[in-house]
Image (cartoon, rainbow, N blue to C red):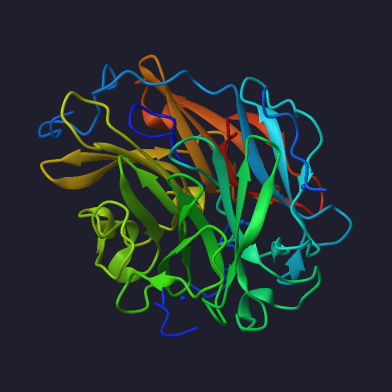
Amino acid sequence: MNRAYSPVLFAPLVLLAAADCRDETTTPTPTADLAMQLPDLAEPADLATTTVPDLAGADLAPPPAPIEFVVLRMGDGNAALSSAATAAFLERRKISDGTIVGTPLALPTAVAAANKRLTLGGSSIGEGSLNLSVDGKYLLIAGYDADVGTAAVATTTSAAVNRVIGIINGANTIDTSTAADFLSGSSIRGATSTDGKALWASGATGTFYTTQGSAAAPVQLNAVNINMRWPNIFNGQLYVSSASATNRGVNMIGTGTPKTATTTTALPGFAAQTASSGYGFVGFDRNAQPGLDVFYVADDSATASGGGVQRWSLVAGTWKLDGTINKGLTGGARGLMGYISGKDVVLLATTAETTPRVVSFVDDGTALDMLTAKELAKAATNTAYRGIAAAPQ
């Protein structure tokens, strides 16, 4: 899902809510998540009268638009994906046409000194969030210190199979030394960071805080177990998506970027969409007032049920669904990144289609149901795309 590149950002085995499953290995009906060398990385006040955001301006001028993205690919294509621990790869591609840049980078499948393995459940669609840190220097991903082939890896005990946070910088180095005993028997789904040192992770029992290189159990931020999906930080605030009934949509975790137990609060308005199934999301400040006023959310529901990329606008303190972008898709979306380009918002998403793809949309003020997907990449047989983000600088 990714830090939005915008004026203010570059975009649990206890009680689980019935609306979500532990490792999310089943695609929602009716539609079908480097030698560790990376490739060359050089290369509105509240809208009280309308739900169409003001795309003409924002509080601050945006940074230069990125020209390349990184997408997480599950599997090497040699065998069908299953719930077993699977090798994962990072593909760097051009935003303009999807052309691959360099050689895909394998995440570690063997222990090397302080660095642990980082594998993910091959068919666990809830896993595999990929984020760019707030400072733009690191990619963040979460997984398991498990050998490839470890059966039903999401249900393993974390004492035996630590959960791992991977930190990848622009100097072609991957750090998987952050591994600990938490989320036991439950899936770890994503991680985010401000600076590559302060780390937040999410999974099937909640949201957690830890620091780079720590082996200690992370601090659980929610007082009770809440089934969380993908995390991100926008405008200095930690958010996590969920499909659980009481936390459906985008949730605010405490205030700012908390490091101790705090509240988890669903943003007002999202719960009204009772069938939504959000994963990646990006937030923007698109008017002259301070604070986020637009969210785009990847929903992996069937397109007939609202799957695709939803746009939400803040209206008198409540979030309202403007509509869903899904023209040209046969399934919903999971990973999402976005950035501002002039008066437009450019969105890149990974799809929940039978054959997953990376597609882009340009929200230029045209009616949402008229915005058409542009294909940038298509997953090969026995592989799937999950998270997507801009490359670290």
Question: Could you tell me residue 55's position as x and y percent?
Answer: 29, 21
Write down the quadrant of residue 316 in the picture: top left
Percent coordinates x, y for residue 131 in the rendering: 52, 45
Q: Measuring from the top left, give residue 110's x and y in whole percent.
A: 81, 63
Q: Is residue 93 visible?
A: yes
Tell me the quarter of the picture where residue 142 sits: bottom right
Q: Please count the marks in the image.
A: 0
Q: Nearer the viewer, residue 342 or 217?
A: 217
Residue in the image at 24% along x and 67% along y: 263
Residue nearest the viewer, comparing 390 with 44: 390
Looking at the rendering, in which quadrant would you find the C terminus? top right
Q: Residue at x 20, y 40 (%)?
A: 314
> Residue 181, percent across and down?
56, 78
| Residue 301 at least partly seen | no
Task: Give the vertical position of 315 relative to 264 (above or below).
Answer: above
Q: Residue furthest right?
A: 78
Looking at the image, residue 143 sits to the left or right of residue 364; the answer is right
In this image, 40 relative to 280: left or right?
right
Among all residues in the image, which is located at the extreme top? 342
User: In the figure, 378 relative to 229: above or below?
Assistant: above
Write down the quadrant of residue 392 in the picture.
top right
- Classify residue 383 as left or right of residue 326: right
Q: Identify the residue at horizontal 21%, vertical 34% (top origin).
A: 51
Near-viewer residue (56 or 234):
234
